[in-house]
């Protein structure tokens, strides 16, 4: 029982860390756009899944959370090497 609670606590900490990292990425993207960069990333798609993530957290549906990260969120970051950032001349 204690081991599973520890793993659950670790999982929630990882989700908190993920959310903090995503917030940082969104902030950087906003600053780049404000400085005339055209950005081709999948950050918006990740943000759209946060509503689902929050709902699963509220329900305590750990299995569905695992599936969401494995099958939907992780693949969005797997393509990060294809994201582009291009300075636009104004």
Image (cartoon, helix red, strand yellow):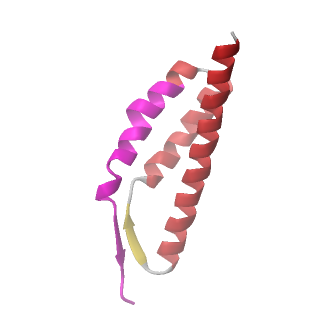
Spot occupied by residue 59 in the image (x, y as percentages of width and height): 65, 22
- Residue lying at the far top in this picture: please name it: 1
Q: Kindly identify the residue that appears in the image at 57 percent across and 21 percent down.
A: 62
Q: Is residue 17 magenta?
A: no
Q: Quadrant of residue 7?
A: top right
Q: Is residue 31 left or right of residue 88?
A: right
Q: Quadrant of residue 13?
A: top right
Q: Kindly identify the residue that appears in the image at 38 percent across and 72 percent down.
A: 38
Spot occupied by residue 24 in the image (x, y as percentages of width and height): 58, 59
For the stretch drawn in magenta, the main secondary structure is helix
- Residue lying at the far left in this picture: please name it: 82
Q: Is residue 35 above or below residue 66?
A: below
- Residue lying at the far bottom in this picture: please name it: 90
Q: Is residue 29 above or below residue 90?
A: above
Q: Is residue 38 left or right of residue 53?
A: left
Residue range of the region highlighted in magenta in the rendering: 65-90
Q: Is residue 79 left or right of residue 35?
A: left
In front here: 17 or 79?
17
> Quarter of the image containing the C terminus?
bottom left
Spot occupied by residue 52 in the image (x, y as percentages of width and height): 55, 34
In front here: 41 or 70?
70
Spot occupied by residue 5 in the image (x, y as percentages of width and height): 68, 18
Q: Is residue 69 magenta?
A: yes
> Quarter of the image containing the N terminus?
top right
Q: Kindly identify the residue that appears in the image at 50 percent across and 40 percent down.
A: 49
Q: Is residue 26 above or below residue 55?
A: below
């Amino acid at each position: 029982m204690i081991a599973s609670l520890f793993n659950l606590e670790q999982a929630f900490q990882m989700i908190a860390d993920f959310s903090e990292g995503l917030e940082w990425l969104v902030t950087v993207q906003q600053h780049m756009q404000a400085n005339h960069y055209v950005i081709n990333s999948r950050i918006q798609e990740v943000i759209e899944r946060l509503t689902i993530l929050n709902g699963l957290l509220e329900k305590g549906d750990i299995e569905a959370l695992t599936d969401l990260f494995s099958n939907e969120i992780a693949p969005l970051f797997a393509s990060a090497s294809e994201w582009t950032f291009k300075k636009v001349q104004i």
